[in-house]
């Protein structure tokens, strides 16, 4: 990225029109920027609120050219945007994060190599490129988790493996594509760290997030992360900073970490963009992860965010619309949720609720962590969600 500050009034581009793009657009628009979204979907969450929505494929040459002409800088809201498209844009405009960094995050083998280069530990693993590799898998990796090297998200493209027969079956089920087999670790907790790094190497971090997953999908984030002590949290932030520095990252980066018995930290994966676990920062911090994304790409000063309220975030999946066991979708009781003090309801404008689909999130803030927990329990009870 060049060094100049891109002042409000300019148009910022985002590749991808999902909820992360939508919340990016909200932050950019609040700061006086115009926003252009490139997404093939006619009704994307971000496209519908942007100043301009280019409805085209990510490699559409005319759309990329228009984006480059219109925008002072471009970012991305999902890691599977073709790195080639970012490289094309980068020939004429600052692009943050860059194509190389995004390419690393698109491939679990490249990602693990990047962690290793940064001196950050991962779960023991093996790359399985073909059925022939299955025979060479060390016994120590079982029981394990087989993950496709590319294109996995929300637990999709993953299988839990108990034995060798199961491994061969799962590899075939996943289509015989390149996978990594990771040893299944006993997790004491899961945390994530979001950092923002500017073009001149300055870095700031959000507080450490504690995450609870259900069925491979993030369900709950709580900040402060009560499951991890302060020293471990500082270590987690240092690891994330080291990864960002070592890959020369510019933009917002999230590193997901496992906490093992005894306190060891192991990196799981990273996302070259704001992350679901950082959504609480919109309502609980004086600078959100989306504000940081805007600042990093416009060359604005990166100021350390301050969390002003303890928070618990609950993901709102499409399942909630069918909580009563009905075949037709029924809108959840939002009025009762809005009656809770400290409730911040975010809905992404998706037309069709489906099981496992992220429709929105709810952040409960309070003066103390205990009060935020208690409000989250009330909200979960109203919605029929399993409690935290
Ligand atoms: P997302 O994109 O939503 O973060 P994903 O599909 O990329 O998810 P991972 O983050 O790799 O998948 O894994 C999803 C969840 O599965 C983790 O948050 C963790 O709960 C569990 N998991 C993954 N790898 C391991 C492992 N090696 N040992 C134990 N649990 C694991
Ligand atoms: Mg993950």
Image (cartoon, rainbow, N blue to C red):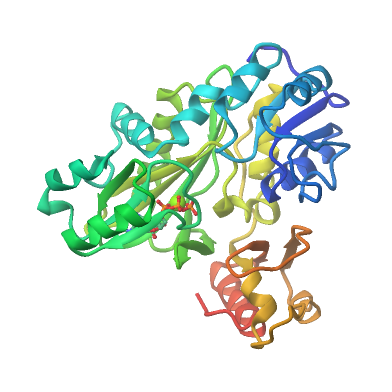
The image quadrant that residue 124 belongs to is top left
Residue 110 in the image, given as x and y percentages of width and height: 37, 31
The residue lying toward the viewer, choosing from 115 and 300, is: 115
Relative to 102, is 210 above or below? below
Residue drawn at x 28%, y 43% is: 122
Residue drawn at x 58%, y 50% is: 278
Relative to 328, is 196 above or below? above
Residue drawn at x 39%, y 30% is: 242
Asked whether residue 184 appears in the rendered view, the answer is no
The number of numbered discs placed on residues in the rendered structure image is: 0
Quarter holding the N terminus is top right
Residue 39 in the image, given as x and y percentages of width and height: 73, 39
Relative to 22, is 363 above or below? below
The residue lying toward the viewer, choosing from 373 and 72, is: 72
Residue 325 in the image, given as x and y percentages of width and height: 64, 88
**Seen in the image, is 239 located left or right of residue 202?**
left
Asked whether residue 61 appears in the rendered view, the answer is yes
Relative to 304, is 9 above or below? above
The image quadrant that residue 280 belongs to is bottom right
The image quadrant that residue 32 belongs to is top right
């Amino acid at each position: 990225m060049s060094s100049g500050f891109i002042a409000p009034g300019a148009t910022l581009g985002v590749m991808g029109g999902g909820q992360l793009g939508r919340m990016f657009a909200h932050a950019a628009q609040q700061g006086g920027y115009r926003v252009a979204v490139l997404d093939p979907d006619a009704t994307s969450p971000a496209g519908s609120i942007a100043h301009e929505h280019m409805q085209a494929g990510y490699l559409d040459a005319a759309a990329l050219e228009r984006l480059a002409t219109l925008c002072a800088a471009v970012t991305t809201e999902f890691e599977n945007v073709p790195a080639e498209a970012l490289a094309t844009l980068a020939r004429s405009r600052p692009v943050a994060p860059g194509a190389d960094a995004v390419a690393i995050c698109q491939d679990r083998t490249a990602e693990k190599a990047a962690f290793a280069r940064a001196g950050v530990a991962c779960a023991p693993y093996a790359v399985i490129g073909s059925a022939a590799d299955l025979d060479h898998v060390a016994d120590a990796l079982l029981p394990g988790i087989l993950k496709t090297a590319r294109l996995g998200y929300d637990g999709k493209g993953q299988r839990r493996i108990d034995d060798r027969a199961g491994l061969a079956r799962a590899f075939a089920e996943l289509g015989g594509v390149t996978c990594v087999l990771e040893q299944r670790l006993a997790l004491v907790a899961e945390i994530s760290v979001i950092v923002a790094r500017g073009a001149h190497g300055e870095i700031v971090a959000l507080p450490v997030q504690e995450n609870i997953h259900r069925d491979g999908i993030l369900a709950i984030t709580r900040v402060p992360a009560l499951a991890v002590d302060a020293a471990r949290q500082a270590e987690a932030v240092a690891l994330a900073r080291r990864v960002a520095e070592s890959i020369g990252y510019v933009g917002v980066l999230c590193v997901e970490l496992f906490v093992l018995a005894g306190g060891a930290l192991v990196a799981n994966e990273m996302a070259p963009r704001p992350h679901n676990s950082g959504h609480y920062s919109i309502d609980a911090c004086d600078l959100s992860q989306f504000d940081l994304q805007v600042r990093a790409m416009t060359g604005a000063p990166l100021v350390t965010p301050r969390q002003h309220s303890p928070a618990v975030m609950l993901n709102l999946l499409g399942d909630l619309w069918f909580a009563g066991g009905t075949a037709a979708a029924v809108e959840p009781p939002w009025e009762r949720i809005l009656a809770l003090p400290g409730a911040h309801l975010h809905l992404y404008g998706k037309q069709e609720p489906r099981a496992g689909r992220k429709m929105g999130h709810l952040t409960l803030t309070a003066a103390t962590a205990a009060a935020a927990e208690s409000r989250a329990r009330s909200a979960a009870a109203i919605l029929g969600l399993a409690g935290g």
